[in-house]
Image (cartoon, rainbow, N blue to C red):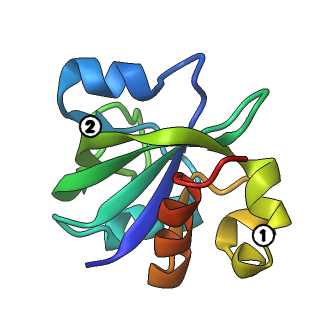
Amino acid sequence: MNYWLLKTDPDTYNWDNLVSKGSDMWDGVRNYQARNNLREIKKGDAIFIYHSGNEPGIIGLAEAIKEYYPDPTADNGDWSVIEIKPVRKLKRYITLEEIKQKPELGNMYLVRNTRLSVQPVTLKEYNFILKLENVDK
């Protein structure tokens, strides 16, 4: 299993949208590096859902349920989608500011490149973030 972080603008699509649908296609990725990462996601991989915007942070956990296929929303180009389902909302919202303050997450892709919408997460980073949800801010 691998670990990932998918970013979304909560004003456009947020955690509650995913929960209400039960599962959904993750579409609209229009960056080649993000697309290539999306194509690496395998069924069963764990995914952090990250809200960008005014208060960026990780809100929930999801799981990949279908590996990549052509993006039906793309008018042109070689773009892909996956399908995911929500697993659970984190016990608390973990902000980007908090993540940046943790030395254990200093090498996290999110800290080094906050703009990429599909990012790998190491097992060590994944486990540390899960521990953070149980710690008062």
Residue 23: horizontal and vertical position, in percent? 19, 33
Q: Is residue 114 visible?
A: no
Residue 111 versus residue 80 in the image, above or below: below
Query: Label 1: which residue?
Result: 102
Amino acid type of the residue tagged 2 in the rendering: Met
Residue 80: horizontal and vertical position, in percent? 34, 52
Q: Which sits in the foreground, 23 or 117?
A: 23
* Quarter residue 64 falls in: bottom left
Residue 51 versus residue 135 in the image, above or below: above
Quadrant location of the N terminus in the rendered image: bottom left
Q: Which sits in the foreground, 88 or 37?
A: 88
Classify 10 Å Cα crowding around label 2: few (below 14), some (14-19), many (20 and above).
Answer: some
Residue 127 versus residue 70 in the image, above or below: below
Residue 62: horizontal and vertical position, in percent? 31, 48
Q: Secondary structure at mark 1?
A: loop
Q: Is residue 108 visible?
A: yes
Q: Residue at x 26, y 67 (%)?
A: 45
Residue 79 versus residue 105 in the image, above or below: above
Q: Secondary structure at mark 2?
A: strand
- 133 relative position to 99: left or right: left
Amino acid type of the residue tagged 1 in the rendering: Lys
Q: Residue at x 46, y 73 (%)?
A: 127
Residue 16, labelled with which disc?
A: none
Residue 25, labelled with which disc?
A: 2
